[in-house]
Image: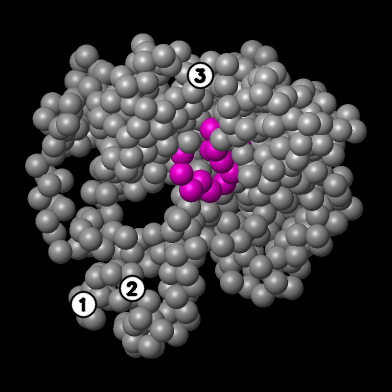
Amino acid sequence: MKRHSITNQQIADMLTHISQILSIKGENPFKIRAYVKAAQTIESLTDQLAAFEDKEKISKLPGIGEGIAKKLKEFLETGKLKYYEELKQSEYAPLTEFLKIPGMGPKHTKLVYDRLGISTIEQLQKAAEEGKLRNLPGLGDRVEQNILRGIKQVQKYKERFPLAFIFPRAHDISEALKEKKEIKSLLLAGSLRRMRDTIADVDILAVSEQNEKVMAAFVRLPQVQKVLAKGHTRSSILTRDNFQVDLRVVAPESFGAAAHYFTGSKAHNIRIRSLGVEQGLKINEYGVFKGNQKIGGATEEEVFKSVALPYIPPELREDLGEIEAAQNGKLPRLVGLTDIKGDLHVHTDWTDGINSLEQMAVAAKKRGYQYIAVCDHSPTVGITRGLTAERLISQMEAIAALNRKLDDFRILCGIEVDIRSDGRLDLENSVLKQLDIVVAAVHTRFAQPREEMTRRIVKAIENPFVHIIAHPTGRLIGKREPYEVNMDTIMDACRANETVLELNAYPERLDLSDINCRKAKEKGVKIAISTDAHRDSHLDLITFGVATARRGWIEPEDVLNTLPLTALLKFLE
């Protein structure tokens, strides 16, 4: 592997894999955590580590100790890491696949391997179905059933990848191709352009007059595991991460038609083609045709105009009413990144965040924000060193001191308070009423029956000091299904109590989903698009939240944090 071809994502993946193998082996937790933190640091870098001229800078990155820095230098210089290669020979290395299964942590993984010799997901499923796991120490019938459900969830997503997984890897490939001078323009199409929460494969369109050179460069990318097909206008690869990427080279005069066709969705395209047929037109990936004459297709606008429609944003192209709305002049003015005035859910190093209060504020101000709400965890979430009432008051004092120093920017004092299983909050109202903003969330007992979970959340909504319900369905895409809850009841309670629902932009969550966003809009419930940032670079995740909101037909006026500071404070009061 050439040094300059190593991407940050590949380095982060390696460090993550090391931490997983070490965790199954039962190594020192601090050592494991060091690799996890290093992976997070590398993944969040804006510059490629391989491009660092001074490799001594590596050890100065936050979360990178001298030992890991030395290993990274070896990997960048040689394309291999001896320690990693040896670790991959461990009998526990293949078992990292088990960690994708909800309910299967490192200890359970090692246990089923050591006691039962189980080394594949198929063997694990068979053992669970036959009741062979429940008698192992620390497992039992309930854990066995959870593991079975987790396996089914992994199988459900086997053919699709979470957006969080695909997005950075697809953009690495896209950026590598953009460096080729033969490519005039390039577009990531398909469900990735529509920003669906899961992606089957990646479609890339390029304009070039030197097809052979472009295809040759594509199939030689360092991400290639296998070349599936190589042709003059289309080639396909299987990446080392086991997803397929198709590259198509099209003529400039067909680029818009191809962009529309390969962006999809299939249902949307069928409707557009049908409208074309009604007007005596043929619309395909090559253009818009009247008989044998090509009358459009260089831009997507030309495709839509040919069937008397305005441009429809990619996020709406699902045949869920967007064509009728376009025909009636009622397409929503979708929320955009520039509409967002601040982030209403960020964490700091007071609990489980990486950066300080000031660092988070400075990063947010650089984005052009007017405010952020610091909402660190309350005590119930024990692993995060949650804030007691006393520590929270100390943080409020620290925030007040910082606000006196900051110009044209405000840090809001908040908390992400846990909603206990009976609906009570983790801190008393006498504490909560002193805050600018209160975000309430479920972090425990996800398996409560639907009625109990619904009552639990509604009780929090009805608390007069709660402003926002965070990640309302608790889903982790590809890892954990939403908990059972009646979202109609939740939204009705939110509307009655003027409580806001969060669209958590963290790409493994995207919770609210696009469908629930649209339902919230129809019910008149405001949403807050927040990142749940645990480090300053996570503020960039707002992109995913805004994209999901757009898929849910959300407009700026539907979003709480499109308000300027003064209007926001008035709302919160």
Q: Is residue 462 above or below residue 59?
A: below
Q: Quadrant of residue 89?
A: bottom left
Read off the magenta span. Answer: 189-202
Q: Depth-wise, is mark 2 or mark 3 nearer the camera?
A: 3
Residue that mark 3 sits on:
251
**Distance from Cα at disc 1 to Cα at disc 2:** 12 Å
Q: Quadrant of residue 504?
A: top right
Mark 3 residue type = Ala
Q: Earlier in the sequence, mark 1 or mark 2?
A: 1
Mark carried by residue 493? none
Indicate the secondary structure of the residue bearing disc 2. Answer: helix
The crowding category of the residue bearing disc 2, from other C-alpha atoms within 10 Å (few below 14, some 14 to 19, many at least 20), is few
Q: Is residue 461 above or below residue 275?
A: below
- Residue 478 at x, y = what percent? 49, 56
The C terminus lies in quadrant? top right
State the residue at coordinates (39%, 43%). 244
Residue that mark 2 sits on:
122
Residue that mark 1 sits on:
117
Between residue 463 and residue 44, name the one nearer to us.
44
State the residue at coordinates (41%, 28%). 233
The crowding category of the residue bearing disc 3, from other C-alpha atoms within 10 Å (few below 14, some 14 to 19, many at least 20), is some
- Residue 28 at x, y = what percent? 22, 55
Mark 2 residue type = Glu
Mark 1 residue type = Gly
